[in-house]
Amino acid sequence: MLDPCGSAPWMLARGKISSAPIFKMKKINNFSLLSKGDAAKPRGIFIWILIILVVVFIYKFIDKDDLIGVIFQNLPPREASLMAGMVFGDKNNFDKNTILNFRDSGVIHIMVVSGTNIVLVFRGLVERIASWFGRRRAIILGFGVTLIYINWVGWEIPAVRAFLLMSIFYWAQLLGRKFNLFRAMILIVLIMVLADYRVFLSGSFYLSFVAFGAVVINSNKSRRWWSDLWNSFWVSLWILPILALFFGKISLIAPISNALILFLVEVVTILGIMGSLVSLIVPIFGKIVLWVSYPILKYILLIVDGLAGFKWASVEIKFNWVWMVGFYLILITLLIKNLIKKSSLQNFL
């Protein structure tokens, strides 16, 4: 009989299958070949030592001021100031007009390190090296490096909130537990309040959590061209009362400026970190990476200066606590009604 592929004849055999092994372990120069588990032990120890050395080296021998200095050596002053602020939280090199333009255009939050930077460093590092070192080691290395990074940029409220969130997220993975965002946010608030109760008096505390919450509850998952504009408007709507309460001024063009600029924060962060680090080792390659970021930084400055030039770019609005609470009650009521409406529609369909 021919086999289904027609390549060779085959026969049906009946009988008892022998239990003898097909292959036997051979010895090479009187040494048995090590099993996978045995071979992994010295390799695992080496990787742990490597991780510790990397963290210690970054902490001891890489200085934030050196990295900022490299940026100013390779970029024009205004663009260098923006990158140093966005990547390393340096606030000492901005001129007054630039600060006012960023404020009036509604994107002053990108002038310093935000939660986005922390998430990008922590998650980016863990997910990139997990396949090389193993997920557990990658998480520990990511934690150590991000801790050094946040120490460089300063323990600002948005950065601390993002660091705690990512730490809890990956800690749940190490323990094999399911991550619950709502419980994590409650725990983060408790940790920050216990660490310093004065955060309740800070506008950035409320801005950080409300903006993050607005992103989470946003039901728009579309990838169409107008989705960025809507997402920016949605977040701006939720933080408006806080801006009116703590600062007495809001930007009317913030949704537009954020939609045009915000997606570039991650690109600038990656280029800034890579370019400054590489410049300390191979200056010419670092210079090339930093110069790639120049058109992006120039674009951001042009957008900000152009939008801030409109007289109606920002208006003065002052809220008190009662007005702020009332505003949020209206927003939450409308949100709940919209969710109920969508749920009823889905049930009907």
Image: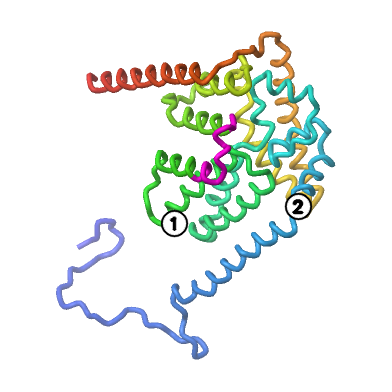
Residue nearest the observer in this picture, 251 or 316: 316
The residue furthest left is 14
Residue indicated by mark 2:
63
For label 1, the residue is 174
* Front position in the image: 247 or 28: 247
Viewer-side residue, 152 vs 195: 195
Q: How is the image coloured?
A: rainbow
Q: Which x, y percent locates residue 206?
A: 54, 30
Label 1, label 2: how many angstroms apart (C-alpha)? 31 Å
- Above or below — where is 20 with respect to 249? below
> Helix or strand or loop: what does disc 1 sit on?
helix
Residue type at numbered disc 1: Leu
The boundaries of the magenta stretch are: 191-204
> Within the image, what quadrant is residue 62 found in?
bottom right
Q: Is residue 141 shown in magenta?
A: no
Query: CB of mark 1 within 8 Å of CB of mark 2?
Result: no
Residue furthest to the bottom in view is 30
Residue 154 percent across, percent down from the top left = 67, 43
- The quarter of the displayed image where residue 1 is located: bottom left
Q: Residues within 10 Å of mark 1 (few under 14, many from 20)?
A: some
User: Is residue 83 depicted above or below 105 in this figure?
Assistant: below
**Above-or-below relation of 92 to 233:** below
Element on which disc 2 rests: loop
Label 2 packing within 10 angstroms: few (<14), some (14-19), many (20+):
few
Report x, y in % for residue 14.
15, 73
